[in-house]
Image: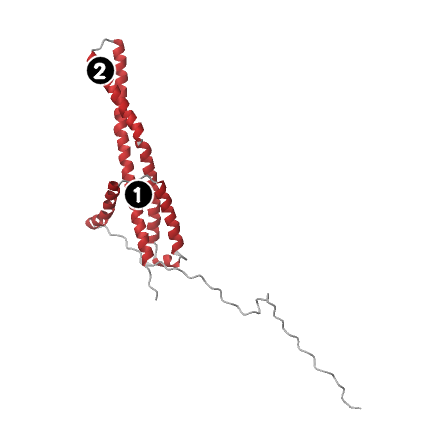
Amino acid sequence: MSGTLDSGPPPRQPRTVVRRGDVSREPKQEQSRPTKVPWTEAVLSLLREWQERAAVSQDAHYVIATRLSRSNLMFGVPVVVLATVVGTSVFATLQEQVASGWRIAIGVVSVLAAVLASLQTFLRFQERAEKHRAAAELWASIRREIDQMLALHPEYLAERSDPKAYLDQLRRRMGEVSAQSPEIGDKDWARAQSRFTARPAQRATTGEVEPPRTSVPTAS
């Protein structure tokens, strides 16, 4: 009989089981970050082009609204004066015997007042002026927004995730405003364009400093 006792096979070491759902034991995978589209000089140039279009549209609509309001006054004031004269003259002819020449003159004045009132109603000066004024306010809002974007520091523009999203939203806004705006004639558009082009020359003549354009920061 042997003096040593047989202790049997050695105990097994417990295994560490890694489950698929146990994220703490699995190697972490780096999450892919979306690539940022830079605010290139081409994007800023497109913004400046849209800024010019909005500024020209704003100026043209304001000028047309002012002209239509003036035309409304030019038609409205004579109508009021002539209607008052006709009404007073009619009462005078009822009380006294008036010569036929005065009767003819009163009839001509009354017809003229009726024609002017009809033209004022048909041409709708005041209604058209309000539409152009409302369109000018919408274009002014778009121009101020683009001015704000161009005036921001280049680093702020570079931090924005995607310029395409902003350009798409701005393009839709400009399309909606353009669709609901009254039509601008070729002459009015050309005059507004010439006034916009002449502004840098006026600033140079008066000594006013033009604000610097926003540039794209270069990668170091």
Three-letter amino acid code at the position of disc 2: Ile
| Image position, residue 63 (x, y; %) | 27, 39
The answer to which of marks 2 and 1 sits earlier in the sequence is: 1
Question: Which residue is drawn at the image coordinates 39% and 50% (left, top)?
Answer: 169
* Amino acid found under the numbered disc labelled 1: Gln
Label 1 Cα crowd, 10 Å radius (few <14 / some 14-19 / many 20+): many
- Give the answer, above or below, for where 109 lies relative to 193: above
On residue 58, the disc is 1
Is 123 or 62 nearer to us in this picture? 123
Tell me the quarter of the picture where residue 88 sits. top left
Closer-to-camera residue (30/210): 30
Circle on res. 104: 2
* Disc 2 secondary structure class: helix
Q: Quadrant of residue 86?
A: top left
Image quarter of residue 69: top left
Residue 185 point in image, percent of width and height: 27, 40
Mark 2 or 1: the one toward you: 2
